[in-house]
Structures are given as structure tokens and as C-alpha cells.
Image (cartoon, grey):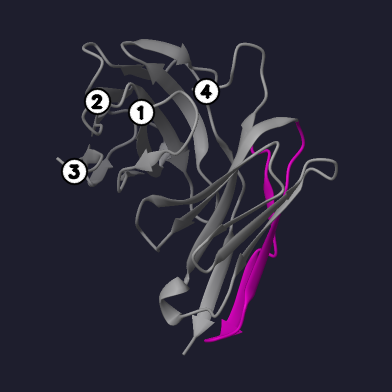
């Protein structure tokens, strides 16, 4: 089963614009992560935000987490054509004794037009 | 190697055949995961190993699927009596810690005719 759900399913923007993707999830979590996947390739980790954090930055990426609303957003600033990819949020459900698996959403397909 | 290695990268088989997919994780990573990804979907969890033991196999869809990691490094995902619905990309990932960032391989694309 997939816990996270990204919104929108697809996003098309011009180079230089900002891209915002949202993720909603259902259960309490230890952390939330964002991954990127180029077409036909494996996933690459972008950023991890823990349940006690509200915002995190990494280069042109900004992630927010609102545990009361069970939602997160990923902002890519000053987008480039090379940012074209699918972006997935993944949650680590909170379980007694610690949790081990990441549960992925269906992803947002981002296209950045040159 | 530097990253997670998966073989074969592509496998085409006939319905009813047996298939093995191999994953070679990053050296020193104790946690190993198998996911399955269908077209247009996110990765779906199958099984997680901590060392040699399967710590969580709740994602295996049925008893045709089995995975092993006998020495705590390389893992093999085994699918018996393949069905057309098994067609997907099978992704392997490893991690140094139980929680945190996963490092994914490029996947094995399985096509069942």
C-alpha cells in the first residue's frame, strides 16, 4: 500500500521558475524523505526531514513538514531543464521499536522547459 | 563497487518460468530492501533485511515470491511460476542504518510474456 500521495501528478514549468510539489500522508511518521527519479533510472535521495523539524534547506531545495496536517512540500527554486524528473515523497511510519521501511507515494512528474 | 548493483538489468521470460534477480549492496550496508515499481507508480515495498534475516517481509504479494541474503551482503529475489502481472521494475536499495537515506540500484526490469 502507498501512504504518501503527491500533488500535482504532473507539473510543467519554464526554466527559472520555482516548482512546488506537495505530499500528504496518513499515519504518524519518524521522518519524511524526498527522492528523485530520472526516466528509467533508480531513485536518488534528495533530503530527509525528521518529524520534529519544520523546514529544511539543501541548495535549491526547500522542504517543509506539517505533522498536524500530515503534509510536506518540496520547493525547487530557479529550476533548470536538468531538474526534469519524477519526484517521490517517502515516509517512515512510526512503529514501536522503530520502523524499517519507507512507504512511497505515486510521485509528481516535473517537466522543466528550456 | 561504489553503488548498489542489480543484475540482470533486463529480463524477459515466459509465463510460468522461474526468475532470480540479484542485488549487490554498498559494502558495509547492513540494511537491504526490495521494492517493485510498476509504470507510472511509486515503488512498492516488498521485503527488508537487517543483516541475514528478513526483518519485514510483509510486502511480498504471495508465496511465489521469496528473497534471501545468506551472508548479509548479496541478496537474491526469487519468483516462481511467473505471471504477466509480475512484470515491473524490481528495485533494490541498501542503507547503513535502520532508518535514514536509502541508496537505490538502477533496477531489474522484468517482463513476463
Does label 2 or label 3 sit earlier along the sequence? 3
Element on which disc 3 rests: loop
Residues at marks 2 and 1, common chain?
A: yes
Residues at marks 4 and 2, common chain?
A: no
* Residue receiving disc 4: A100
Does label 2 or label 1 sit earlier along the sequence? 2
| Vertical side of B112 occupied by B21: above or below | above
* Residue receiving disc 2: B28
Residue B71 sits in quarter: top left
Instruction: Kindly identify the residue that appears in the image at 23 percent across and 47 percent down.
Output: B9
Element on which disc 2 rests: loop
The x and y percentages for residue B16 are 33, 28
State yes or no: discs 4 and 2 in contact (Cβ < 8 Å).
no
The x and y percentages for residue A32 are 62, 41
Name the residue nearer the viewer: A71 or B87: A71
Disc 2 residue crowd, few under 14, some 14–19, many 20+, Cα 10 Å: few
Residues at marks 1 and 3, common chain?
A: yes
**Is residue A94 within the magenta segment?**
no
CA gap between label 4 and label 1 equals: 12 Å
The x and y percentages for residue A18 are 62, 78
CA gap between label 2 and label 3 equals: 11 Å
* Residue receiving disc 1: B96
**Is residue A11 within the magenta segment?**
yes
Q: Nearer the viewer, mark 4 or mark 2?
A: 2
Instruction: Kindly identify the residue that appears in the image at 55 percent across and 34 percent down.
Output: A102
State yes or no: discs 2 and 1 in contact (Cβ < 8 Å).
yes
Label 2: chain?
B
Name the residue nearer the viewer: B100 or B50: B100
* Residue receiving disc 3: B2
Span shown in magenta: A1-27
The x and y percentages for residue A19 are 62, 73
Element on which disc 1 rests: loop
Amino acid at each position: 500500500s502507498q501512504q504518501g500521495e503527491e500533488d500535482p501528478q504532473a507539473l510543467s514549468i519554464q526554466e527559472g521558475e520555482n516548482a512546488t510539489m506537495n505530499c500528504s500522508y496518513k499515519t504518524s511518521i519518524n521522518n519524511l524523505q524526498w527522492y528523485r527519479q530520472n526516466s528509467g533510472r533508480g531513485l536518488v535521495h534528495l533530503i530527509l526531514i525528521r518529524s520534529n523539524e519544520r523546514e529544511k534547506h539543501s541548495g535549491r531545495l526547500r522542504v517543509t513538514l506539517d505533522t498536524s496536517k500530515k503534509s510536506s512540500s518540496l520547493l525547487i527554486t530557479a529550476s533548470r531543464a536538468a531538474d526534469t524528473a519524477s519526484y517521490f515523497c517517502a515516509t517512515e511510519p512510526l512503529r514501536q521499536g522503530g520502523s524499517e521501511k519507507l512507504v512511497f507515494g505515486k510521485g509528481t512528474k516535473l517537466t522543466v522547459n528550456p | 563497487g561504489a553503488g548498489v548493483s542489480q543484475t540482470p538489468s533486463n529480463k524477459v521470460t515466459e509465463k510460468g518460468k522461474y526468475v532470480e534477480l540479484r542485488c549487490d549492496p554498498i559494502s558495509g550496508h547492513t540494511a537491504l530492501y526490495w521494492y517493485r515499481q510498476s509504470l507510472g507508480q511509486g515503488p512498492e515495498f516488498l521485503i527488508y533485511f537487517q543483516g541475514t534475516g528478513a526483518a519485514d517481509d510483509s510486502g511480498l504479494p504471495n508465496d511465489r515470491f521469496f528473497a534471501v541474503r545468506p551472508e548479509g551482503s548479496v541478496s537474491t529475489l526469487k519468483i516462481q511460476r511467473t505471471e504477466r502481472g509480475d512484470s515491473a521494475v524490481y528495485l533494490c536499495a541498501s542503507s547503513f542504518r535502520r532508518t535514514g537515506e536509502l541508496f537505490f540500484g538502477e533496477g531489474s526490469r522484468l517482463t513476463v510474456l
